[in-house]
Image (cartoon, helix red, strand yellow):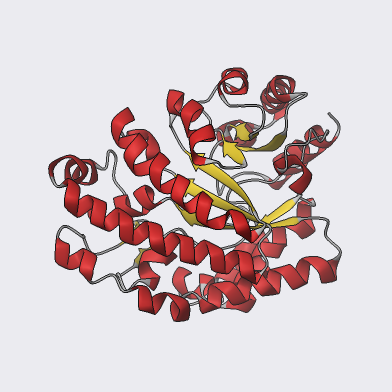
Amino acid sequence: MLRALDGEVVWPPPIWLMRQAGRYLPEYRALRASAADFLTLVTTPELAAEVTLQPLRRFGFDAAILFSDILILPWALGHGLAFREGEGPVLPKLRDAAGVAALDPARLPGAIAPVLETVRRVRAGIAAEGHDAALIGFAGGPFTVACYMVEGGGSKDFAATRRMAYAEPALFAALMERLTEATIAYLSAQAEAGADVLMLFDSWAGVLSPSLFARHVIAPTQRIVRALKGSGTRIIGFPRLAGAMLGPYAPETGVDAVGMDTATDPLWARGAVPRGVTLQGNLDPIALLAGGEALRTEISSILAAMRGRPFVFNLGHGILPETPLEHVEALVECVRAS
């Protein structure tokens, strides 16, 4: 994994899956039942570390990704957060300067202490169990985190967030500044705790116009990457649904790797993203759910497009909870045999 992220062509390519520690695993579901709620699960180090290690034991992936959530960051800054069954995350709607001012960076070190302890436990667990795997820490991109805070949860189009960016640029810039600085602190702490790789999930980058994408995705990512470069970790950026903006995103931000979402043509990305930047992706999670010949065809197509290129095999979005375990086993076998 680390060699591939350093720009080396490693074949067969390393493989891990977004949301690989989660609801498709029966051992995860059993552990989840022991926690009062999701927030308790991600902030209890012994439980979160166990969930992080579970997919390594079952599938032998080349990386473990920290079991957490991108909304831990606003929660750590003092913003309200709850996860409701069947509804997802619910937050107070941040719509004014008072809401931005209430975000308290002084709370961050104490609030993220359980997450950092999870990183340390996973680092030790990978070594103790003999896994040949990297450890990925992560955070949400500042724009994506802002989306949930402004909307108060998920949304189809994040219209209120985009309206704020256009109509109240000073207010939105203040929110982005607070979140960018907090993201740098959060990711730096994960690197110090033992993360080999840091991934920035900008899941809703694709809802922005090119000008706002440059201002609220590329610019803050560039600042975050520059601040983290001295940590020795590799950085993966995932500006989901970025489309043609993936081309400028890669060189301008300085990330070591770019995640391709399901809709990205790997052959196009191969030409649009500089060769010095590793590509990661981008199997459709529905193809993994379907399995069989369709799955093998999709895997083969991606591998053919990426052969000779620094590459990490992954999904184009998170694994679905109903995915059969045998399909994941088939995926790993197919990639390893390439």
What residue do we see at 53% from left, 30% from top? 262
Residue 258's quadrant in the figure? top right
Q: Is residue 185 above or below residue 243?
A: below
Q: Is residue 96 above or below residue 305?
A: below
What residue do we see at 60% from left, 49% from top? 235
* In-image side of 286 versus 100 (left or right): right
* Residue closest to the eye, 26 or 45: 45
What residue do we see at 53% from left, 25% from top? 264
Q: Position of residue 117 (x, y in %)?
A: 61, 77
Say if residue 204 shows up in the picture: no
Q: Position of residue 7 (x, y in %)?
A: 73, 37
Q: Position of residue 220 (x, y in %)?
A: 40, 48
What residue do we see at 18% from left, 51% from top? 170
Say if residue 321 shows up in the picture: yes
Give the tally of numbered discs.
0
Residue 65's quadrant in the figure? bottom right
Name the residue at the bottom extreme.
Answer: 110
Q: Position of residue 335 (x, y in %)?
A: 78, 34
Quadrant including the C terminus: top right
* In-image side of 33 versus 70 (left or right): right
* In-image side of 274 versus 151 (left or right): right
* Residue closest to the eye, 311 or 301: 311
* Residue closest to the eye, 30 or 56: 56
